[in-house]
Image (cartoon, rainbow, N blue to C red):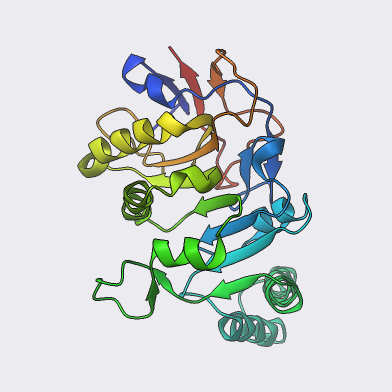
Amino acid sequence: MVENLNLSFGPHLAFLQPELVNLKRFGVPRDGGYVGPPDSIANNSVIFCFGLSRDWSFETELSAQVKGARIFAFDPTVNLKMFAAECFATLKQVFNFKSDESLNRRARVFRYRSKIVKNYLISFRLQRNKHIKKWIKDKSSEIENCISIGEIFTKYGKNREVVLKIDIEGDEFEVLNELLTLGQMSAIRSLFIEFHVFDSNWQNFSDLVHKLKETHSLVHLHVNNGDLTLIQQATPHYLELTFIRKGILPETKELRKSLPIAGIDFSNKESLPDLNIKFA
């Protein structure tokens, strides 16, 4: 484990050094929020959310910034019925006076669960956003209930600027390779992605980042501090990267020398400090 929470990225990791641009945070100041340029989204954009989980504050805050933006979330692992059941279970715990947990703690959990239900109803029932409960896989996949990248872009993103967030626990490599194969990267205005990098897929990760940088600028990097184990390249397992299509921002040759950025970056795991990175 990293003991001093300080890490130097040497020359072999120079491809991960972000450009020095103006940034802001979208979403909560914890896991679920992402950092990107204010110009990450444009009018009449669509936001594709690959991996919804229980927090879509990033997508809703981003979409509120411009007119006509819509969110299309793809995640078959969650739904309103599940959120409501979790909320009801925590409500029963509030009145479970035999519980070892404090009443304050039980009430806090109930408020959190009820807020999820409320936010889901507002975001995906009262607004024009859609939650599509399907896996993102090619139709040749043996997995049932899936939708392909090609279908997503044709059905929901045709002739529109696309903002793409990917947080799908390792499947990001398959999705990105498909995007590159189909030539869909030109439609993506900005890309927010969490990579799950291990020794076995390091080369694939490196190759993908280099390919992405041919058309998009790397403008931010953040280490998810939930697991600070390092792989052989002295790189943490979980890296959040933000890209924006070249030509949107003014050209700059300046690179950011250290991370995280105070007031913009926040720990994914709140009980631990962020990992400090310096580029050689």
Residue drawn where x is 75% and y is 59% of the image: 68
x%, y% of residue 18? Answer: 51, 25
Residue drawn where x is 53% and y is 46% of the image: 188
**How many marks on residues?**
0
Up-down relation of residue 264 to residue 196 (above or below): above
> Splitting the image into 4 quarters, where does residue 36 fall?
top right
x%, y% of residue 87? Answer: 66, 81
| Quadrant that contains the N terminus | top left
Query: Residue 36 or 276: which is nearer the viewer?
Result: 36
Query: Is residue 87 shown left or right of residue 212?
Result: right
Query: Is residue 103 shown left or right of residue 150?
Result: right
Query: Is residue 76 shown left or right of residue 10?
Result: right
> Splitting the image into 4 quarters, where does residue 202 fall?
top left
- Determine if residue 171 is in view: yes
Query: Is residue 108 shown left or right of residue 180?
Result: right
Up-down relation of residue 162 to residue 80 (above or below): above
> Splitting the image into 4 quarters, where does residue 144 fall?
bottom left
Query: Residue 69 or 207: which is nearer the viewer?
Result: 69
